[in-house]
Image (cartoon, rainbow, N blue to C red):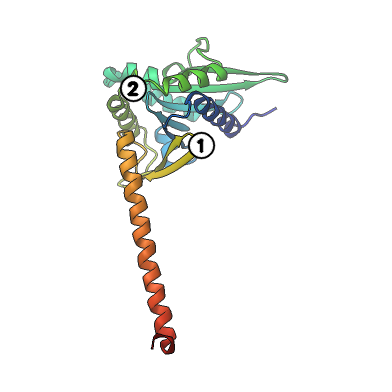
Amino acid sequence: MKLYENVVIGNFLYTLGFSIGSKSQGNQTLSVVNLLQQTPEDKRLADALLQFQGTVKLIEFKNRAGSLKKEKDKHARLVKILTNNAEFTHVSREIHWYIETNPYKKKCVNKIVPYLDAFDEVASVHTLESMVDEISNEAFLEHPKVSLDECQAYLKLIASHQGGKKSGSSETTGGLLVALNGTEVTYLQYTDILDLRLTAKQFSEKVKTQEQSLMKLYQEQEKKHELERTIERPGLSR
């Protein structure tokens, strides 16, 4: 039996969304869920980057039956990075996680530990269920355990040292910010997934600005089309 990583990721994110939705109690919830697998950020960061009001999580998903050589090389680079930047070790252990699946015939055993412990002989800190529950609880913290500024600095630090982009490339990977407000869902795109400074007020202002820009564009297009129709049918304009 082979349990592909994307199957685990899909179900994990689905369950996390359900858990957060059930705990939101109809209040507005801002979420950023970036599935980075097979994007330029996969090699620099991990498979998934999650951001909520009260927490940030960077998660790598692996199947124990697959080849782990590239991941072990990536892990070794991270250890080296943090050896020279020890002040970020506590940030790493809080937000950067490794989820390894090891499927058997009747059940799926998982190793879920901070990424720094990924290849050490240590016991799993979580099950998939408890990991989802912890993240959904932390999502609503008014004061995150690790500040967004520290999280952003950590992500930029490891992204700049892990490679994965062509030399001199200015390409950035964009993302979507999702706002849940009762039964209403609103999306807002942004240009760089490493930007973690968006607040609810900024989000509302950006949505309003985006809606106004779209409305203005629509009105200009309608005026243009009306003018074109008038030119094509000059007899009707008299």
Question: Which quadrant of the structure image shows residue 151?
Answer: top left
Q: Position of residue 74 (x, y in %)?
A: 42, 28
Q: Position of residue 192 (x, y in %)?
A: 34, 41
Q: Give the total of numbered labels.
A: 2
In the image, is 50 to the left or to the right of 199? right
Residue at x 30% of width, y 18% of height: 83
For the question of whether residue 171 can be seen, the reply is no
In the image, is 180 to the left or to the right of 167? right
Question: Which quadrant of the structure image shows residue 104?
Answer: top right
Q: Which residue is mark 1?
A: 183
In the image, is 53 to the left or to the right of 125? left
Q: Which residue is mark 2?
A: 80
Residue at x 52% of width, y 9% of height: 123
Residue at the far front: name it: 238
SS state under label 2 = helix
Nearer to us in this view, 152 or 120: 152
- Distance CA(mark 2)–CA(mark 1): 46 Å
Nearer to us in this view, 105 or 188: 188
